[in-house]
Amino acid sequence: MATIAFKNLRDRVKDRTSKKVEFTIKDGDGVVISLVGATIEIDFRYNNKIGTIVKETSIGSGITVVDAANGRFDLDSFLLDWAIGCYWYGVVITFASGDIDENLQGEVKVLQNIPN
């Protein structure tokens, strides 16, 4: 049975640019998994795991593969213009073999910005 890995992101501030987030995909023994030929998608949902999708990303559209052979990719920076609240995200990796991994997920909180 696959283990779900949680990576909660740091709190973000509404109407600010969110910094990139770095990911390295490893197996249960800590060995990196190659992403050569893989597709990667990340969806963000409002309030819970089955909530309304507020952002969809994929390679070339919000995701940058940094080092496919060593399992490294980034969620690119973006303007966070979402409502204040809690959001869940899930990563879906489809490997060149056709195997699909949906075991990486987490949450991020969007906080009110404070005007200067």
Image (cartoon, rainbow, N blue to C red):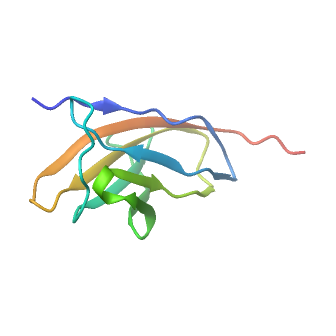
Q: Which percent across, then down, holds residue 74?
A: 46, 54
Q: Residue at x 34, y 45 (%)?
A: 90
- Residue 106 at least partly seen: yes
Residue 110, quarter of the rendered image: top right
Q: In what quadrant of the picture does the N terminus appear? A: top left
Q: Image height check: is 14 above or below 81?
A: above
Q: Nearer the viewer, residue 83 or 76?
A: 76
Horizontal side of 23 relative to 30 (left or right) equals right
Q: Nearer the viewer, residue 24 or 111?
A: 24
Residue that sits furthest to the bottom in the current view: 60
Q: Image height check: is 75 above or below 6?
A: below
Q: In what quadrant of the picture does the C terminus appear? A: top right
Horizontal side of 18 relative to 22 (left or right) equals right
Residue 32, quarter of the rendered image: top left
Q: Residue at x 22, y 36 (%)?
A: 27
Q: Which percent across, then down, holds residue 18?
A: 62, 50
